[in-house]
Amino acid sequence: MNIVDPAIDTYLKGLAASDDTEVLLEMEALAEERGFPIIGRLCGGLLELLACSIGARRIFEMGSGFGYSAYWFSRAIGPEGEVHLTDPDPANERQALDFLGRAKLEAPIRYHVEDALAALEATEGTFDIVYCDIDKSGYRKAWDAGRARVRVGGFYVCDNMLWSGRVTGPIDDLDTEVIDDTNKAIAADEDWRSVIVPLRDGVVAALRLR
């Protein structure tokens, strides 16, 4: 199921073409070559907008790959902030540090080559944004761990929350069941105000109220 009408998606991507940089285009080409899932230009712009809207300076990513989402966060936070990236593959770390270094975005980067939840637990303090894009079976655990680490007035953001429409049912696999359960948990949490933005595969943006 296409979440966004293909004609609308093409139109929106055309508007976002002004964001072209050599590094960004390289990252997108590598993702296409490898069949590696990235959030894409439109959701990247949303991440940057959310970070700018709250003056984010400290961001933790659960699931980073070779740094595509961190590229967009780094555009927003500047040299006085920091972005924590996580991925168990050292090759992704090397590729991310190369891309982000050449992009010259100035935001300090810390890459944790380990499980995302373990890295979050081992990292002290709260964050302006916790972002999740790990294996879908871990989404509920990520929400339970991440929600406590976001400051009041900060965001919990997670990709693939509509899961190509599979959350509408019938639900007959674990990943879809976990995503649906996580959506319902976030929506029901009275300490948060949330919305699922139907860009690409659905992005939830949850604002911590208290």
Image (cartoon, rainbow, N blue to C red):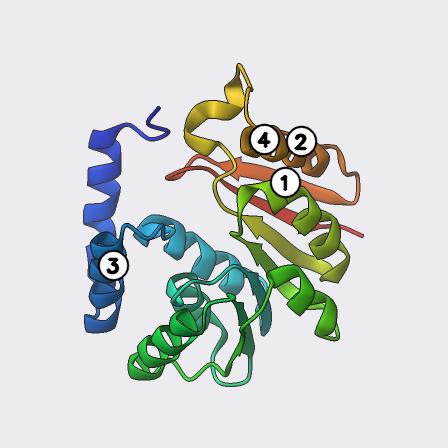
**Residue at position x 37%, y 29% in the image:** 3
**Circle on res. 181:** 2
**Which residue was labeled with disc 1?**
194
Identified by mark 2, the residue type is: Asp
**Residue at position x 18%, y 47% in the image:** 14
Residue 98 picture quarter: bottom left
Identified by mark 4, the residue type is: Leu
- Give yes or no for contact between labels 1 and 4 (Cβ–Cβ under 8 Å): no
Relative to 30, does residue 109 appear above or below in the rendering?
below
Q: Earlier in the sequence, mark 4 or mark 3?
A: 3
Rate crowding at label 3 as few (under 14), some (14 to 19) or many (20 or more) other CA atoms within 10 Å.
some
Q: Earlier in the sequence, mark 2 or mark 4?
A: 4
For the question of whether residue 20 can be seen, the reply is no
Rate crowding at label 1 as few (under 14), some (14 to 19) or many (20 or more) other CA atoms within 10 Å.
many
Q: Which image quarter is the N terminus in? A: top left
Task: Tell me where residue 41 appears, x and y as whole percent.
Answer: 31, 53
Which one is closest to the eye, mark 4 or mark 3?
4
Q: Earlier in the sequence, mark 3 or mark 1?
A: 3
Between the C-alphas of marks 1 and 4, the distance is: 23 Å
